[in-house]
Image (tube, rainbow, N blue to C red):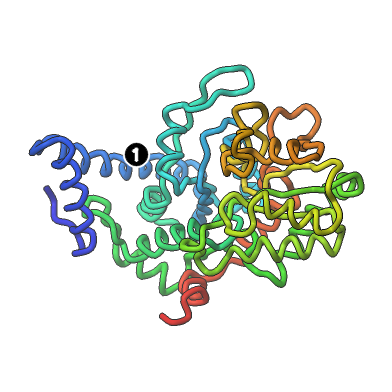
Amino acid sequence: MKKIKSFVLAALAFAMVANVFTACGDDDNKTENVINNIVSEYSYNDQLVANQKAKSKKNVAVLLVAFGSTWNNAFLAFDKAKAAYEQAFPEADVYMSFSSDICINRASAGENVDDNGNIVKRDYYEPRYLLHAIGAAQYSKIYVQSLQVIPGEEFAAVVASVKKFMNNGYIANAHLDDDYLAKLADDEAIFFGMPLLNDPEKDVPEVAKQLNALYAAEAAQGVVAFMGHGNPDSYDTFKANVRYTQLEEALQKLSPSYFVGTVDMPDNYKQDVMQRMQSKGISNGKIYLHALMSIAGDHAHNDMAGEGAEYWDEEDPESEDNSWFEYFKNNGYESIVSMPAGNKHPQGLLELPGILNVWIQHTKNAEFLEDAYHSMYPEE
């Protein structure tokens, strides 16, 4: 087995090997398979990216990093977002990656079907593999764009991936040319695009404006409730949960019918949204539900739009497993999952051109990696 480049990665490799031993016994072949599988991921992506660069002859790369999904309608949304980026950055090759191993594995296995009932399998890869491939192809300028909504836990993982890439901190088989990496840093050639609601002074009011342009007609007929993800208190990286509160405040300046809740932010669950509605005297009527997430995946289909007995526990009406649709319906409201005509799925934010353009502008205004990193970690 080849030497690991750093002590930290040696420890990581040791942990990986230990896991194999614990699960399977002293089996050197299985240990080698774990390492070889990782190496093959690098090699496969290196070839894909090298072929793309040779074909396009471009020297700029844009890497989009989403958490991921297993739903076909989400895959199509990612495809459209990638196409929009290719139009906005004609000088660049655009790549898409998932930061969630679970989403990557389940998407590859074909967890869901398309609207015709056909199993859909998609191959996506972690940012580390595509970043290495982009580096191996020696693009002269690299943009990494977070497709997260808030600068929370998942965004921090994206930052870590880029920092590791710049430190060339993976396994020995994935070693990149140090002179090339140093040139990227010296020339300030790798840039980092922030999440959708990064800036409370600029992004929050702009997103509120774009949402109101789409849903003002619904707000005139009833409540429009947006469901975001949020982070538990212990994972509220950069104290980003406050963006949901700020967005609700910005939206309510445009109409008192807008509310913003989450599935994971303490004191901002569906029960809290209903309490805020009732405190304003809204105890019945229509409530239009929208996903405040980059794509409409499991949370949008199940936690928000889930309909029927499977999504409502009469014995525990406050259960977190009860969907927003059923919760509001069983509390005296007319629940409506808002979808465009002819669409069988809720929409995610990437499918809304005005919102997608906010992300695109973030990429165009992206900061050099070190500047972006230190603005988030001023103590370092």
In this orientation, which residue lies closer to the viewer: 263 or 18?
263
Q: How many marks?
A: 1
Q: Position of residue 328 (x, y in %)?
A: 74, 41
Q: Is residue 79 visible?
A: no
Q: Nearer the viewer, residue 113 or 363?
A: 113
- The amino acid on which the numbered mark 1 sits, given as a three-letter code, is Tyr
> Where does label 1 land, which residue?
44
Dot 1, how many residues are within 10 Å of its Cα: few (below 14), some (14-19), or many (20+)?
some
Is residue 249 positioned above or below 285 on the image?
below
Q: Secondary structure at mark 1?
A: helix
Rendered location of residue 163, percent (x, y): 39, 65
Residue at x 38%, y 52% (from the top left corner): 128
Q: Is residue 286 left or right of residue 154?
A: right
Q: Position of residue 123 (x, y in %)?
A: 44, 34
- Given residues 92 and 122, the one toward you in this image is 122
Q: Residue at x 56, y 53 (%)?
A: 264
Which quadrant of the structure image shows residue 117? Answer: top right
* Residue at figure coordinates x 72%, y 62% from the top left: 247
The reply, left or right, for residue 43 in relation to residue 358 is left
User: Which quadrant holds residue 181?
Assistant: bottom left
